[in-house]
Amino acid sequence: MSRVEEVIAARKAAGSGALVGYLPAGFPDLQTSIEAAVALAENGVDVIEFGLPYSDPVMDGVVIQAATQKALSNGFRLKHGIEAVAAITSRVDVPVLVMTYWNPVVQFGVDRFADELLAAGGAGMITPDLVPDEARDWLAASDRTGLDRVFLAAPSSSAPRLHQAVEKSRGFVYAVSTMGITGARADVDTAARSLVGRLRTAGATSTCVGIGISTPEQVREVFEYADGAIVGSLLVKALADGGVDAVAKAAAHLATAK
Amino acid sequence: MPLRDEVGPYFGEYGGRFVPESLIAALDELDAAYQAARVDPVFQAELAQLHATYTGRPSIITEVPRFAEHAGGARIILKREDLNHTGSHKINNVLGQALVAKRLGKTRLIAETGAGQHGVATATAAALFGMECVVYMGEVDTERQALNVARMRLLGATVIPVISGSRTLKDAINEALRDWVANVDTTHYLLGTVAGPAPFPVMVRDFHKIIGDEAREQVLALTGKLPDAVTACVGGGSNAMGIFHAFLDDADVALYGYEAAGEGHLTKRHAATLTRGRPGVLHGTRSYLLQDEDGQTVESHSISAGLDYPGIGPEHAWLHDIGRATYLPITDDEAMQAMRLLSLTEGIIPAIESAHALAGTIKLGKELGPDAVILVNLSGRGDKDMETAGKYFDILDTEALEAEISEPAPDGARGDNA
């Protein structure tokens, strides 16, 4: 069992679920992004999803787009992302998964990226635009290093595709709650509940729901049927508006759902 | 295997589907519908009927001897896609995809556009078939192609200026993909070039290969032999794939794609993807792209909005690697001079995109000499480019234009329906 799986299983055993918090590296600057991630860990977040800024983030809504764009215009480089992972994991014990679009990893070198992420204490990678069908290099590199690999499952995914996502993922399966991109929504789609049910049928034992979740009520609701809830845009907005203190507060507020 | 038989999803190591899982079902559905349509005589007849009665196909070929005098005296023959309804080759693909979308029961078309030609063509098809239409266009491009924005709106489309990223074509594609992820049940993403995730590169190529099929017969009938070279401009690469395809297995026919070199391919302001880029993943496909060391997409530049794209279709990447086609850079100025030359010598005003192919052909003609026959894909007409050309050559009566603009517009005439 990977560390992420252990953390999620422990939260489940406690009768609750795991809170996964997303923040992008380098926003508003590298040091602050490290402090903010540490603040997540110190305020009840169980798994950190640390996003690497990319020029063409097709799965992201305006809040995360604006943040990652700012990080890039401030001169963010991939090596900074790995340094930040090392800095975070040296201070807190919460597993850190890197969320990244695929081209930066390809250009860095898939094996080199896996090696450096492992050396930095990273737990693995979430790949929003890489489906298992195209992931041969990453499947090999993650098997070699033992890093987690989180693939996405969508309400539109066929049964064979859900089966594939479950089979190829390690850590958890990322259940996309709704057909759309990141950003807070008033209602987390009922499609999420049915998707998680279908993933369970496909054999999933570790499933976290993301996209659109921004309140403790929504987190609690997700815990009723899934193993974890992923919150992103709300935390990014808190960081943009109120700095690390606001992120800490927002995380603590979400953690009341646990 | 003949090169013409390559149907993807990979061309050598290029192509594939690098998209969010949410889109896979839609791509599978599209692929199945397209595979059924391409062998369905009813579908083919419907498309052929539209080509004949709406687009104006077959498009003619025109030999241009006065222009050719400036190109080493080679015989130069233009394939006149500029004469198609809506003014470019883009309509070929749009009508085909719109018919497929109808078969899928989709009621809404979305598209990205750079120069506006693909957006206009998509808005046209949406009007023709009674479908809703939303076109994403980089804010920078809405400014330099204002006339096409007006055309799309007149056709009933909603034009959304994209203000994310570099505010050009690549960002318009990102926005269209985001829209598609959220609205895939009702919406078909009518991608305008031979890039993107499978099945787009093959499907778009197939809808454009009529260009080369017609031209091959027409040139044979005119000259009694195949051309020595076929030339086209390349941004994403749809018009080039369309004309190249019929000749892929004619070993004696050289194929030349001309990329936009902007201010020079050795400067930072160009869109010469094969000349200066390297393989990577962008917009759902593995191909060459302009990127920095970290794989962040680098902004491209071209005076022609339609070529201002940092990627290129995967089939071109493959043809480049195996040496079947040659891709060379053409600067803004070379293209503009060729635009003027064709206008002055033949009375044909080409789109600035197509003028890149003309500029390349001038060089090629000088290399090949007077015995050569060169077929050029004149992919679009230049009406949309009059403001750019007017400023470039300083032939715009700007005082008169400003006077016209400063007069208050009638109510609603400048309304934004975005």
Image (tube, rainbow, N blue to C red):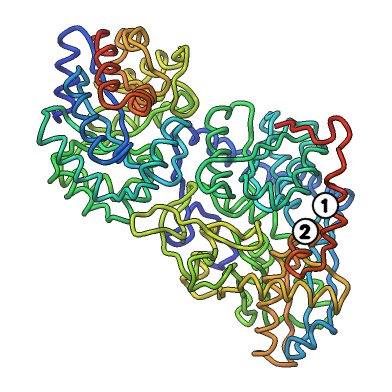
Front one among B92 and A3: A3
x then y, percent, for residue B398 = 82, 59
Element type where label 2 sits in the image: helix
Q: Are marks 2 and 1 on the same chain?
A: yes
Residue at the limit of the structure toward the bottom, as seen here: B370
Q: Which residue is mark 2?
A: B387
Question: As shown in the figure, which amino acid type bears the numbered disc 1?
Answer: Glu
x and y, in percent, of residue A36 in the image: 24, 29
Amino acid type, label 2:
Glu
B306 vs A35, nearest the viewer = A35
Residue B22 picture location, percent across and down: 47, 31
- The mark found on residue B411 in the picture is none
Residue indicated by mark 1: B402
Front-most of residues B206 and A207:
A207
For marks 2 and 1 on the same chain, the one whose residue lies earlier in the sequence: 2
Instruction: Give the CA separation, mark 2 to mark 1.
Output: 13 Å
Label 1 element class: helix
Q: Quadrant of residue B68?
A: bottom right
Residue B139 drawn above or below residue A65: below
Q: Nearer the viewer, mark 2 or mark 1?
A: 1
Q: Chain of mark 1?
A: B
**Is residue A194 or residue B301 the one in the foreground?**
B301
State which chain disc 2 sits on: B
